[in-house]
Structures are given as structure tokens and as C-alpha cells.
Image: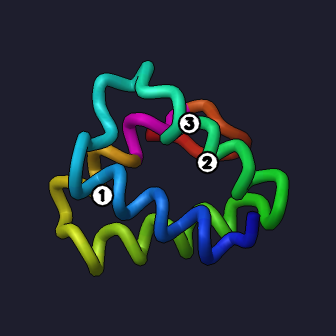
Amino acid sequence: MSSEQLINELISIGRTKGYLPREEGRTREIGEELNKMGGMGLMQTAHEQVSSSLGNVKARELESAWSGIGMWRG
């Protein structure tokens, strides 16, 4: 799956279910995949797209959900 597809899926999750509780598995899986593909830079790009599409509240939820993945600190 491409990074664009993963980010689109991430936005879809945010629209429908949200990113919390943190145990929501797919959100963390996507974060781990993005981290493997492009590290913190790609995770930041995904976060920016979530923020732009869904707003700051959802972006903050994503920050918390991804805490501890790679260099990400929520």
C-alpha cells in the first residue's frame, strides 16, 4: 500500500471512528507502516493532512494514538 493510500485510510478512520482509544489497532498499524516507509517526516506529513482535513481536535487525538511509534511523542 502506498503512503497516499495509508493517509487516506487514516483520514477515513478519523471521520468515522476517531483515533482514540489508543488501542484502536489500525491507527497504530498505519503509524508504524508510515514510520517504516519514511520515518518521522512521513508521519508529520500524514498528521498535517489529518489536521487540514479534520481539524485540530482530530489531529491531537492522532498525536496521542501514535505516541511511542518511532520518534513520535504524543
Q: Say which mark, if any, is on residue 28.
A: 3
Upstream in sequence: badge 1 or badge 2: 2
Quadrant of the snapshot with the N terminus: bottom right
Out of 51 and 2, give the one closest to the viewer: 2
Q: Is residue 69 left or right of residue 66?
A: right
What distance separates the C-alpha of mark 1 from that of mark 2? 15 Å
Q: Which residue is drawn at 24% across and 41% down?
A: 17
Task: Pinpoint residue 73: horizontal percent, then vertical percent.
Answer: 53, 40
Q: Residue at x 45, y 65 (%)?
A: 47
Helix, strand or loop under label 2? helix
Upstream in sequence: badge 3 or badge 1: 3
What distance separates the C-alpha of mark 2 from that of mark 3? 5 Å
66 in relation to 46, above or below: above
How many neighbours does mark 3 have within 10 angstroms: few (below 14), some (14-19), or many (20 or more)? many
Q: Residue at x 55, y 75 (%)?
A: 45
Range drawn in magenta: 63-67
Q: Which amino acid does label 3 sit on?
A: Arg
Depth check, mark 1 against mark 2: the one in front is: 2
Q: Say which mark, if any, is on residue 7.
A: none
Q: Say which mark, if any, is on residue 30.
A: 2
Helix, strand or loop under label 1? helix
Out of 47 and 33, give the one closest to the viewer: 33
Q: Is 34 in the magenta?
A: no
Q: Quadrant of residue 42?
A: bottom right
Q: What residue type is labelled 2?
A: Ile
Q: Mark 1 points at which residue?
A: 59
Task: Pinpoint residue 33: horizontal percent, then vertical percent.
Answer: 74, 50
How many neighbours does mark 1 have within 10 angstroms: few (below 14), some (14-19), or many (20 or more)? many
Task: Pinpoint residue 34: horizontal percent, then vertical percent.
Answer: 70, 57
Q: Is residue 12 left or right of residue 46?
A: left
